[in-house]
Image: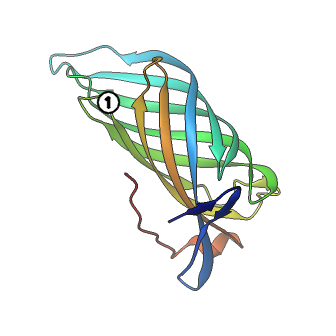
Amino acid sequence: MTFTWSNLIERATSVVDGRYTTTDWSTVDVLSFDRHIIADADASGITLVRDTLTERFTGGIDGDGRAEHIRHLRPDGSNTFVGIERVTAVIDGRLGSFSLTCHGTTATDGVVHGFWRVIPGSGANGLATLHGVGEFIARQQPDGHFQAKDCFTHWYGQDDDAANCSVEFTID
């Protein structure tokens, strides 16, 4: 939950498994998208593809990312994907970078829904001890590019602090 009064934004803070966490929201714009076919469609109609994305995050995460997604693409356009991304950004006033893994699905209407997790130990500089999980929903915009709304719950600590933490949330 977030509350906005003029230029003031109150972020949701809670305790998960004894750690203070912060939940932020971001908008993610896909700036570029390049598809490579890994395996052409077979008798099932399934094609395997690798997509390279360049993204711009604004909001709780403010920065840029570069991602690779592997997709199991069905003839109706729906798909299941897994991916990895490197993000260089400012979070909580801290400048640094981190890597994440993601997985999700794209429905026949083109709506993308996925989840991601910061890879423990992947943070650098101001984000060296960052941990967190996220959820996103992306839709194609009238100008043709995809834009996602992202909810990210995060905390800072030692690598082993993330071992038993689970966070549940949903976004609309």
32 is higher (above) or lower (below) than 13: above
Residue 32, position in %: x, y?
58, 20
Q: Kindly identify the residue that appears in the image at 23 percent across and 25 percent down.
A: 74
113 is higher (above) or lower (below) than 45: below
Q: Kindly identify the residue that appears in the image at 47 percent across and 27 percent down.
A: 146
Q: Kindly identify the residue that appears in the image at 70 percent across and 45 percent down.
A: 62
Seen as rendered, the residue at the extreme left is 43
Residue 55, position in %: x, y?
61, 32
Seen as rendered, the residue at the extreme right is 125
Q: Kindly identify the residue that appears in the image at 66 percent across and 49 percent down.
A: 61
How many marks can you see? Answer: 1
Image-quadrant location for residue 89? top right
Residue 122, position in %: x, y?
69, 53
Of residues 104 and 71, which is closer to you in this image? 104
48 is higher (above) or lower (below) than 9: above
Of residues 74 and 150, which is closer to you in this image? 150
Seen as rendered, the residue at the extreme bottom is 18
- The amino acid on which the numbered mark 1 sits, given as a three-letter code, is His
Of residues 13 and 120, which is closer to you in this image? 13
115 is higher (above) or lower (below) than 28: below
Residue 93, position in %: x, y?
80, 57
Left or right? Give the position of 114 relative to 26.
left
Q: Secondary structure at mark 1?
A: strand
Image-quadrant location for residue 28? top right
Disc 1: which residue: 72
